Each structure stands twice: as C-alpha cells, then as structure tokens.
Amino acid sequence: MGHIIAVSNQKGGVGKTTTCVNLAACLGQAGRRTLVVDLDPQANATSALGIDPHQLASTIYQALIGRAPILPLDLTPTGIDNVSLLPSSMDLAAAEIDLLGVENREHQLRRILEPLSPSFDYILIDSPPSLNILSVNALSAARWVLIPVQAEFMALEGLAHVINIVQRIHAGFNPSLELLGLAVTLYDRRTRLAAEVVRELETIFDGKVFASRITRSVRLSEAPSHGKPIIYYDPKSPGARAYQELSEEIQHACEKTGLGPGA
C-alpha cells in the first residue's frame, strides 16, 4: 500500500502547494509512483502541474459527492515522470454544503483512495488552508501529515493550532495518523530570526524537523506559472536541490517504519 501524506497547514502562504507539487515530482524522478490529490478549491496544485482546471470534465469533486465511480477513476496524466493527478476545480468549494447529511462524510476521501493506494508508492494530498470538511477528509485519509512551516515568528503561534487539529483528528477519526515532520519553507539564510525560529522548532519538535531548508527563490516562484515543478523548470537551482533533499528525507522517514512502498 502507498504512503498517504497530507500536506497540511491552516496558515496560508507557507509554501504548502509548492511543497506538495515539487515533492511529488522529486519522488517521481526517483522512480516512485506518485499521486497528487488536489483537495483545494483554488486548484493551484492542478495548475502547477500544467493542467487547466477549467478544461476538465470531472474532478475529485464528483467523486467526493458520489457523482463519479471510484474505479475506474479518471486520473489525469501530468507529463511528469511517474506522477498522476486527481485534479481539483472551483466546484470543490461547494463540497461543504453537498456533504451535509452524508453518512461518514469525514471519510469520503479515504473511500476514494483505498482502492487506488495499491497502485502508488506515495499519495500526496494538497489540503486547503482552512479547517473545513475538506481538510478533515485529508487528515482522516492520511497515514502521515507533513507540515510546511515558514521560518518566521508568527509561524510558531499558528503551528500550535495545526498540531491541535492533528491530535483531534487522530482521536476522533483516524487513530493511525502521525506527524511525519515539519518542512521549513521560505527560509532566508540572511536573517538571524529565521535561524532562531528553526532552533525553536527543533527544540519543541525534537527529531521531527527535516534538515532540508527550502529557501526563498525567484525561480521557485516562477515555476508554477509555467506549469512545471522546479526540477523540470530549473533543475540546477537551489530550490530543485532542496526539494530533492527533502524527498530523500521523507522517503527515509516513511520507509524506516518497515512499511515501504507496496508493503
């Protein structure tokens, strides 16, 4: 079965979608069969993988509300090695209302992913930057949660809220959910504050802060507008190297459990 990782943070602007898309591309480049699940109505992960959400006949929205069969589910090819996409669209914003009264509505995504999981080594869920039924579905379906954290003081306050939500989902809906780790994003090596924030994170979350640092980068910001992950847009850039390093760390963290891809 594939490792299902929810990339989640209720604080916006922390590089959540950037991390999801670029991590998927790096896993694919390493030969890992990877599925990106775009669970954000903004559909930024879909666009960042070169897919126009306005041109899609069906998206994850139809599957979530039961208007499309789970299998065969129309997964969208991305042109990225070993990476498939379960795309999103603005229709997904209506899911909160459409799922009212649906039995086990917190587990709709798990219902969709269970038959797909054996076909993939990794499934990455790009969660919305808010606490709603979609983010609850993401955490209820995942084995792991990866939290991108911006290296700034306010991130520490927001992080306590995220951890509280993860603990509540673990207790109420998904006892298998565990924190995979924190990925430090938008890191500015020139500032003392960034280094201080990371030291604080490492003190609080001992052993759960990945060593890779995703630094601020113009090239990394440009890549989504071209519909390409950074390793395809500028493979020699610092951003590409950082996400490749993070990919290696995450593979090691997941697979040291003894449940490697396909297990």
Image (cartoon, rainbow, N blue to C red):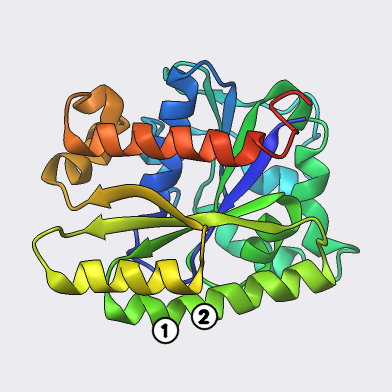
Mark 1 and mark 2 in contact? Answer it, CB < 8 Å: yes
Quadrant in which the N terminus is drawn: top right
Helix, strand or loop under label 2: helix
User: Mark 2: which amino acid?
Assistant: Ala
Q: Is residue 142 above or below residue 114?
A: below
Task: Give the image quarter of residue 238.
Answer: top left
Residue nearer the viewer, 37 or 22: 22
* Of the pair 195 and 166, the residue shown nearer to us: 195
Query: In this figure, which residue is indicated by the disc labeled 2?
Result: 160
Disc 1 to disc 2, how far (Cα)?
Answer: 6 Å
Q: Residue at the left extreme? A: 190
Q: Which residue is mark 1?
A: 157
Q: Is residue 173 left or right of residue 192?
A: right
Q: Residues within 10 Å of mark 2 (few under 14, many from 20)?
A: few
The reply to whether residue 4 is visible in this rendering is: yes
Q: The disc labelled 1 sits on which kind of residue?
A: Glu
- The residue carrying pointer 1 sits among few (fewer than 14), some (14 to 19) or many (20 or more) residues within 10 Å by Cα, namely few
In the displayed structure image, the side of residue 27 where residue 135 appears, left or right: right
Residue occupying image coordinates x 72% and y 22%: 119
Asked where in the image residue 200 lies, by quadrant, the reply is: bottom left
